[in-house]
Image: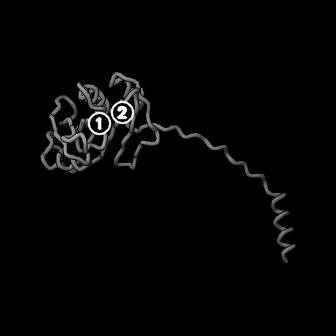
Amino acid sequence: MKQLALVLVLAFSMTAAPVALAAPSVQPFSCPLIDAAAVSSAIGAPVTLVPFAMIDDGSSVQCLFQGSGDLSVVTGRRLGFFGTDQSGAFTPDQLDRVKGEINGEVDFTPVDGVGDAAVWATFRDRGTAPDNLGRLLVKRGLDLITVGITEGPGAVTPASALAQVLVAA
């Protein structure tokens, strides 16, 4: 019986059409929010996407870009972060939720001219900060757009320029 089964398998395999397997393809990594060229243009310094530091779960996207030296830029968007509140300004409750997203005690400074409302967030105690990024948090409708950029004098200016590009997209 085993020999009959083996003969049938061999006979079938010799008459069956060969199966062609496609060569694996390389999937390009890209940030669904913005590409490296647009980030570079907005902040005035060249950056590249760090492909394995990208998160996209459908309602939340976060992409990391690296430049020379210690330059890091994080872009992000959280759909529906503000629930049903379409008011322009951040409410105290919303700022508390944002603090939870950042994981630290931060100070907020209002930033004009970006989205419906925007604040620049900096850590109170640099020793407990998870990174060296200041964050521009932008309310656009019900969504939260974030731009994190290596802190330093004037960091809010390139962060605002990048946020304008993200808001317009």
Residue at 20% across / 50% down in the picture? 97
Counting residues from the N terminus, which is met first, the one under dot 2 or under dot 1? 2
Q: How far across and down, in percent of the image, does residue 63 sit?
A: 38, 39
Q: Residue at x 16, y 38 (%)?
A: 108
Is residue 139 at least partly visible in the picture? no
Q: Which mark is residue 133?
A: 1
Q: Residue at x 34, y 48 (%)?
A: 59
Where residue 20 sits: x, y (%)?
Answer: 72, 48
Residue placed most toward the observer, 142 or 112: 112
Contact between labelled residues 1 and 2, with CB atoms less than 8 Å apart: yes
Query: Is residue 167 rendered to the left or right of residue 36?
Result: left
On the question of residue 44 being in view, the answer is yes
Could you tell me the amino acid type at mark 1?
Answer: Leu
Q: Quadrant of residue 2?
A: bottom right
Quarter of the picture holding the N terminus: bottom right
Q: Which residue is mark 2?
A: 72
